[in-house]
Amino acid sequence: MVPIIVLIPAALFCLYRALVGPSIADRAIAVDMMGVVFSAITALVALRLKLAYLLDLSIALAIISFVGALALAKFLEKRSLDD
């Protein structure tokens, strides 16, 4: 239970950085970190409640977050997605 309580402020700090961040790159990193933190929270809840489908949800969230970060990095470099 303690790791979940520690991760919630981390998610709030990431949300703050995503909203106020001085540059687009800072906001992109904050959104990617929020995906990692939410994936970790989901995995910890799955372990705590012994629900296997939440682990699948956590993995799917991590994959979607990773693909989104890649797409945003390509966009920031002003390159097409098929390169």
Image (tube, rainbow, N blue to C red):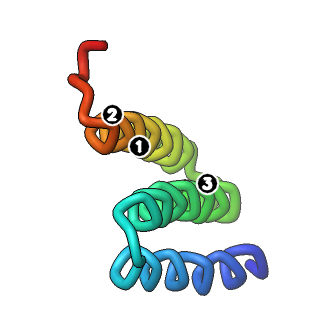
Between the C-alphas of marks 2 and 1, the distance is 9 Å
| Left or right: 54, with 22 as reference point | right
* Label 1 sits on residue: 69
The amino acid beneath tag 2 is Lys
Q: Where's residue 55, x and y in %?
A: 56, 44
User: Which mark is drawn over residue 74?
Assistant: 2
The amino acid beneath tag 3 is Ala
Q: Secondary structure at mark 3?
A: helix
The answer to which of marks 2 and 3 sits earlier in the sequence is 3
- Name the residue at 44% across, 85% down: 16
Check the picture and name the quadrant holding the C terminus. top left
The answer to which of marks 3 and 1 sits earlier in the sequence is 3
- Which of these two is toward me, 76 or 40? 76
* Label 3 sits on residue: 43
Q: Where's residue 38, x and y in %?
A: 51, 63
- Tell us which disc is closer to us: 2 or 1: 2
Between the C-alphas of marks 3 and 1, the distance is 20 Å
- Tell us which disc is closer to us: 3 or 1: 1
